[in-house]
Amino acid sequence: MKVKMISRNPDNYVRETKLQQHKIPRNYDPALHPMEGPREYVRALNATKLDRVFAKPFLCNLSGHRDGVACFGKHPKLLSTLATGAYDGEVRIWDLANRTSQRSFVAHDGFVRGIAYARNGERLFTVGDDKTIKVWRTEAPDVGEEEEPVNTILSRHILHGISHNRKDNSFATCGEVCAIWDEQHNDPIKTLKWGVDTLHTISYNPVETNVLACCASDRSIILYDQREALPLRKVVLTMKSNKLAWNPMEAFNFTVANEDCNLYSFDTRKLQSPLKVHFDHVSAVTDVDYAPTGKEFVSGSYDKTVRLYNAHLSHSRDIYHTKRMQHVVCVAWSLDNRYIFSGSDEMNVRMWKANASEKLGVIRPRERTNFNYQEALKEKYAAHPQIKRIARHRQVPRHVMNAQRKMRAVKEKELVKEANIRKHSKKGKVPFVSEKKKHVIREDV
Amino acid sequence: MSDDEEQYDPIAHKKLLQAVSSLGNVQHIRKSTRDERQPEQNEFQLFKSANATDHAAKAVGVNDLVQILRTSKHIETGKKLKNVHSTKKVLQKPLEKPVADRIKRTIGYEGVKKKLARWDAVVAKQRSAETQIFPIPSETIYVNTAAHSNAIKTSIKSELGKELQASIKKLNDLRKVQTGDNTDEQELAQEEERLLAQKLTRDELHARRRELAYLRMRESQKSAKARMQNKIKSKKYHKLLKRQKILEQVKQFEILKKTNPEAALEKLNALEKSRLVERASLRHKNTGTWAKNLQMRAKYDKEVRKDLAEQLAVSRQLTEKKVDTDSEHEEQTTTKIETNVDESIADPFNPWMTLKQTENDEPKAEEEEVSWRKYWTERNQNEKLLTDHNAEVEQVKREKRQQTTQPIKESPKKKKPKIYMENGWQVEEVEEANEAPAKTKTLDEIFDAQKDNLNNHLIHKLNNLKRQAALLKRLSKKSKKPKMKHDALKNLKDLTFKKTKQRVEIDEPLNQDELEPKEAVKVIEAVNDLPKSKEEKNSTAKVADIDPDKVIPITWKQKMRLSDVVNDALADDDAAEFDEADPVAERQMLISEAFEDDDIVADFNKDKKDDSEVKNNELQLAMPGWGCWGGNGISEKVLERRNKRLLLKLAEPEKRRDDNKDNVYINEASNKQARAHRVSSIPFPFKSLADYEASIRTPIGREFVPETAFRMLTRPAVITRKGQVIEPMDESELVKPDRRLRHVVDKRIKRQEEQAEKAKRLLVD
């Protein structure tokens, strides 16, 4: 029997060197690809499923603190360094790459209220309940040397928070008053007051560095300019704001974490109503931090969850929780936009991936292309019901579910009641008030 | 130095002395000393002056000072001081602190707002960017180091080179001196530069040529337009043109009347003459073909009727014999009495006024001719009557002004002359020619009267306006005034571009599920099963049915306009009329002919009907024998009631898609699984179905589009680099020039944009 061999010219299919990619002849004529739509849809579906399969955001747990974690300080230059302060006055510096504690020292009596790095990252400022501001060197002391602050400033007022200017040597503290300090002086350059007894948190605008904002105990947010002699403006919400974060890419936008389970994004120039109300938390939101890209932010809540939001959407895109994580007190987004840190009541600092299903480690170019393609497909078919269902499905703790159910019931009840009142009163007497406008009580000049 | 001197400390000594001297005093509070700058003084650190009570008795005033000065030799100074004190005003009390603070805060806030607004453009650009790269590429100086690039111009010369240059220069100077050449090098260079500047560059020449061509084109266009206009045959056009011309003439006449009454008179004479000429000619006799056609058409067309009426009016006016002045006079007197009541607006002796009133009426030219004629014919006859009448009018006016002005309705009833045409069609005059009698006086008086009239009119108008304003005010008090709020974010909104690539945005709460302890195991199992299940899915070919391209159009399909329906109905009517030519009917005939034996049409319809029939709409849950323990048929009624109770009614099946489509059978069974995969409404940023469909239709895979397109289409929205700190936005971003693109895809996108822009510009040109 004679076997006829098909002979082909190897030049057409054999690559010349090992470094070249295989030649794949392709014909892009759409007539030859009648099923391109369905094929891509299936790919998108698979990509979405894989995305959920690989969604394992929890990276590691940094344990070492002996009391609840109170605050974070991000190093402005080093990605692998994080400073955390605890309720017992201990400050720890972590080496994130090795997941170990580099250094620890007791900085204050009582709580550490705030940590801020100087702009070049050489100094570390901490404030505590003992009314002192302490300045520490960033590098660890030599063996045998004791941990000692470079400088200790006794403040006249109680201190609740600290923030460092990104461009010059000034920093600001809040407490009874908002005080602007210079690194070289032991007295504040300026104290700014506006009839409020406690300011809980303070934050410098990272872009327009003269502007800063405080959240006060009278449920207000106060804007300051460090060059002005007086505060600028105050906006009062229905409930107290716990934390404030400026958008690092959009100088005029900031977001506050509020006690009423919501977050509010404001434009500094238009404080009458927030730009966006961010829902989904079921208990007081305790902390918020922006991603360095300014597109997203992370929030930690008393409901023991961490949620990630797109800055311009009102519902969270993801929720992180573990069984052992208690009330989240502080959160931070790493400066390379990759990781999220959460500190909670039960003494642990946790590290999460900012993108739950992202692959860590080296990604080869072809792999990268494939990820991009999958991402694009998911985005393209995001509105398709099956894909949406899979992509947005999350398992949440029971207490969150219950609380959500309760909140929904309350909200529905209120809606019904309002509708009934409207129905039985004169036309136009019970106006429709948008959700945005409900939460701002007034703007003080 | 002795030990004693060494130990002596002056500060300590002073302190000691002070302590000793103040032993007797009770005062312990010291004046605070500062070593650190601080803007606020603590109230607890204030120094309490020892003899404060002694001084507080009486403050020193300016008067005391003056008194003292007066006694001394500085009398002049004292006087000056007193003068100053008496003449200068005391400054106003400053604002109260809260108010002043508020003002300061407002100013500060405005400043910050302005500062922040600088970022609008940058932020808007960032937001609309298709791909953002972080960290934002910093400003870098790029130096082209390629071999073929031009070398950097500035070069450092060596010592030797400098010497050489100097010596060459010296040599040149020497040579110049020797040859007696005294031209200035610099001057020459300047001259050359000037000449060069004079010379047009190639581009400039092109530009000029283009400009010239443009001018020529405009010229030719205009001439062509003029030529075309001359050729226009449309009657309507010419009518309008004529009217326009007449209007212009009237306007000119008005001006002339004001500036040069003599010329106006002459013009009037000329008009009169032209009228005579026309009267002598055969025009407007209504005997031409045009007029006859018009009569025919007038039966059906309202517009034509109007034209005809106008024409008739013109003809009547022209052919009218000049009426006996006496009779006319009588008429005028009668009408005068009638119109006297509302004299303030219509002055019968003021032809200009009447003219003005009728300005808006349609057949103007004719009327005006009439009024002018009347004006001039009556001018010399009414002198006497005028004087009397004038006095009367003045009096009335005075009375009027004292009274409250009321809106005056002026519509003297006019008799419409009816004309009967040959065909029995009755024509009524649409607009009455102005027959208000005009009496004359000298031009000055006329103008005075006119002035008064105008005044009156103005007062009237003012009152009207006031009343309206009051009304508006009352209204605004009642209804909430819509506040014109200045939108602080307007600039940002204006600057935002529409995104070129729209992405679906899903802003919904996550569909959450309770986390159960068993769940984890399940998930693991699911992971293990995953490849298998995937294969299964593919093999069942359910997925093959999916047609994600087709989004079920829910709302759009139903929205059919009423006019469309009407059109369809009309089309159907047409089809019915031309039945023979209908190819569909023909085909139907052909088919039925071909299958004469078996009636496939009927079969088809029957099949369809069977399929669409409601199959299991009800489900009987009652079991036979249940409840009939005592035997069958105890009570038929009870059984029936029970059966009725246990009958489970299912939901009505959905209507078939081909329900009202004859000859069409849509197989719905095959699509049922696919339905779960389809989008039911248009997702957020998309506004139209077409847009969304287009975004879905474009494939992005490697297999379907070329490699470069694939890379462009799958570019992520945010690109970050591992291990790099992303700094917040920097001030340099505000003044940054365009970034030099290094990535191939970036370059390609940029090139495409440029090409598109160029094409657009070409199109515009």
Image (cartoon, grey):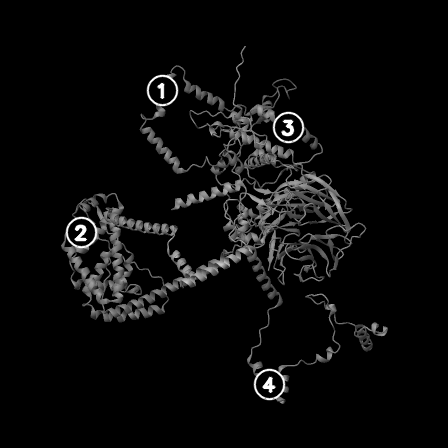
Q: Nearer the viewer, mark 3 or mark 2?
A: 3
Dot 2 amino acid type: His
Mark 4 lies on residue? B78
Residues flagged by tags 2 and 1 on a common chain: yes
Dot 4 amino acid type: Gly
Mark positioned earlier in the residue sequence (4 or 1):
4
Say which element carries label 3: helix
In this picture, is A321 found above or below B42? above
Q: Nearer the viewer, mark 2 or mark 1?
A: 1
In the rendered image, which quarter is residue A233 located in?
A: bottom right
Quick one: B734 or B43, which is closer to the camera? B734
Chain of the residue displaying label 4:
B
Mark 1 lies on residue? B590
Measured Cα–Cα span from mark 3 to mark 4:
106 Å
Measured Cα–Cα span from mark 2 to mark 1:
67 Å
Quick one: B135 or B403, which is closer to the camera? B135
Dot 3 amino acid type: Leu
Classify mark 2: residues with Cα within 10 Å, few (<14), some (14-19) or many (20+): some
Residue B52: x and y in percent read 73, 77
Dot 1 amino acid type: Leu
